Amino acid sequence: MSLKETLKENDYSIIASNGYHSFDNGIKPVIVPMCEDISFFKGLSVADKLIGKASAMLLCLSGVKEVYTPVLSKSGKEIFEKYGVSYEYDELAEYIINRKGDGMCPMELTVKDIDDPKEAFEALKRKLAL
């Protein structure tokens, strides 16, 4: 079974080709293992149910090989293209919407004006108090 199928059938929020998976929402399933090992996703294939610029920057910093997501933001797509990461998506969104549905996701806002993945990693850790 592909990561894409496994993501959908098990209702995971993320699954990686090394067996890592999570049901947690937001960027925590990406950033938490990176706090232990910044190269956690190096060379891996990843399926994540929602990817915005924040997750895209983290995955690129970590060295991800390829990504599938049902929903990708335009700024996330630009990051994958900039860093040469192979990606597939079902729907391209203007931006990731917050949980209330009334604005931009706070993680996407945190990195909106950041171009460097290392700087984004530090800003997101501060935002999440990690």
Image: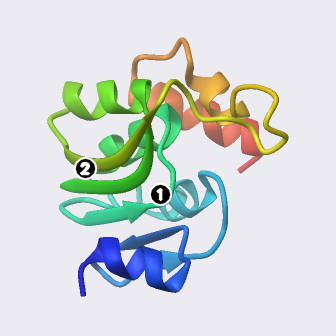
Q: Callout 2: few (<14), some (14-19), or many (20+) C-alpha neighbours within 10 Å?
A: some
* Residue sticking out furthest to the front: 91
Residue occupied by mark 2: 88
Q: Tell me residue 119's x, y (percent).
A: 49, 26
Q: Tell me residue 39's x, y (percent).
A: 32, 57
The foreground one among 18 and 88 is 88
Q: Quadrant of the N terminus?
A: bottom left
1 or 2: tag closer to the N-terminus: 1
User: Relative to residue 96, is residue 75 depicted above or below?
Assistant: above
Residue occupied by mark 1: 34
* Label annotation for residue 105: none
| For the residues bearing labels 1 and 2, Cβ distance under 8 angstroms | no
The foreground one among 49 and 33 is 49
Q: Mark 2 belongs to which amino acid?
A: Glu
Say whether residue 84 is left or right of residue 7: left
Toward which corner of the image does residue 19 lie, by quadrant? bottom left
User: Relative to residue 74, is residue 89 depicted above or below?
Assistant: below
**Residue drawn at (28%, 55%) of the image:** 67
Toward which corner of the image does residue 77 lie, by quadrant? top left
Q: Tell me residue 38's x, y (percent).
A: 40, 54
